[in-house]
Amino acid sequence: MRADPATGFVHRSARFATEVLAPWVWVLTLPFAVAAAATRSLWPSVLWGLVVAVTASVIPMVVIVRGARGGRWDGHHVTNREGRLVPLVVAGASLTVGIAVLLLGGAPHEMLALAGSMFASLVVSMAITFGLKWKVSLHAAVAFAAVVVGALVYGPWLLLLVVTAVFVAWSRVELGDHTKAQVLVGSLMGVVVGGGGYALLEVLLRASPS
């Protein structure tokens, strides 16, 4: 029996969204966008963007890919809940180093707010994943958090990017990697913890003495 072309297209679209809009991609690019708005200068934007991008995205992703190739967990998206412990711990430890560099280097408060909201998201995701033993969608969480942070930094027009967040959330269900509930909770976590955490920390850090 020949495969349905429409079904094949839908599956390929879901796979495309899952790969191109994966958490590490958002976390790699968002720091540079926030740094550019915070510093309005090329080299400081590159410097502070790199600190967060490397410690929050590159280092954890290297560990994840190596572990996936070694069979320690299920693929580079770590689709098995039990396999998420080491990647999340590594991400938290690496980001802690990044936050320390930001503090010691006198980074703009917006970068500290971004890194802090990312760390908070890691803590909450670990609590859900291992405390509640439930596989919340990190794809959805990171995508929605990035959209909210982008809108807070550049203006509400960036909320138009919610279409891409919805696209990646849909893809996780379509590929069978998450249930609708896991994606919805991930989306809510992204808005409240990722986006709301950034907004709260940004206000608090802006008001604090230099």
Image (tube, rainbow, N blue to C red):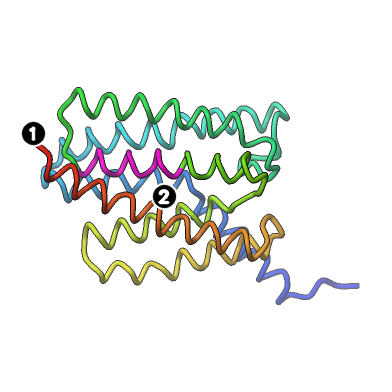
Residue at 25% across, 46% down: 201
**Amino acid of disc 1:** Ser
For marks 2 and 1, the one nearer the N-term is 2
Q: Is residue 200 above or below residue 130?
A: below
Residue 39 image point, x, y percent: 12, 43
Distance, label 2 to label 1, CA atoms, is: 29 Å
Which residue is most to the right? 1
**Amino acid of disc 2:** Trp
Q: Secondary structure at mark 2?
A: helix
Residue at 32% across, 39% down: 115
Position of residue 148 in the picture relative to residue 2 (left or right): left
Residue at numbered disc 2: 26
- Counting every numbered tag in the picture gives 2
Residue at numbered disc 1: 210
Quarter placement of the N terminus: bottom right
Q: Quadrant of residue 157?
A: bottom left
Comparing labels 2 and 1, the label whose residue is closer to the camera: 1
Residue 129 image point, x, y percent: 61, 43
Residue 11 image point, x, y percent: 68, 65
